[in-house]
Image (cartoon, grey):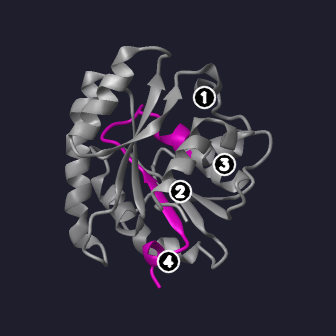
Amino acid sequence: MGIGRHHKRAVIAVINLKGGTSKTTSAVFLAHALHEQGRKVLLVDADPQGSALSWNEDAPQPFPFGVVGLPTKELHRQLRDFVGQDVNAVVIDTPPLEQKSGIVTSALRVATLALVPVAPTSIEYTRLGQVHEIVQDSAEFRIDGEPVPFAVLLTRTVPNATSTEAYRQQIRADGLWCLRTEVRRLEYFGQAYGENVKDAHNTAYGDAIKEMLEKEVVA
């Protein structure tokens, strides 16, 4: 049975067109939140820059789950060598689509959800359509021939900013799933690299997982 077709295994590919969009932070916190909720997690660093791998290596204690580097267009084939039957959640930190589209497309071949962290700004909103188009086009490479479910997570938001809700409503008007959850622009997230993550399930990322459970894209 293929990685992406196991009905009890979530495979979340965190993607975006460019770097600097909170992909690695989101992937690491989501992986920790899933682990804290009792799941057997594998974090996959598919970015040649290896930021998630470095984070794990630099932290005072290793992450409490497996972390592997697979910056390859063969990720969809090689991943199965690292996923045992007990692993029921995989989070993939991908490189920027504009630089390494082949790697991202490989990740989308096995994903059960494409999650796009997006700041509520005009430039990031403008790029969202291109990201969605690439995800739709990747359907031809998937076993089921269907595009992977697509979700937008608003990040780096400012409290009480009217722009946040305006962009959420616009994204939804475009026919895309935009989570209710938003990730605030906090020092806790901005300074988290190289540190151990604690209580991730009590952050916005834990709330995002709850929404995924509601939508049944995480079992």
x and y, in percent, of residue 156 in the image = 47, 25
Stretch of the chain drawn in magenta: 1-27
Dot 2, how many residues are within 10 Å of its Cα: few (below 14), some (14-19), or many (20+)? few
Q: Amino acid at mark 2?
A: Leu
- First-in-chain label (3 vs 2): 3
Left or right, 44 with reference to 104: right
Specify the label residue 6 is tagged with: 4
Specify the label residue 32 is tagged with: 3
The image quadrant that residue 187 belongs to is top right
State whether residue 44 appears in this view. yes
Whether the residues at callouts 1 and 4 have beta carbons within 8 Å, the answer is no
Residue at 20% in and 40% down:
174
- First-in-chain label (1 vs 4): 4
Residue underneath mark 2: 213
Residue at 30% in and 77% down:
144
Left or right, 184 with reference to 152: right
x and y, in percent, of residue 178 in the image = 36, 41
Q: Nearer the viewer, residue 99 or 182?
A: 182
The image quadrant that residue 147 belongs to is bottom left
Residue at 47% in and 85% down:
1
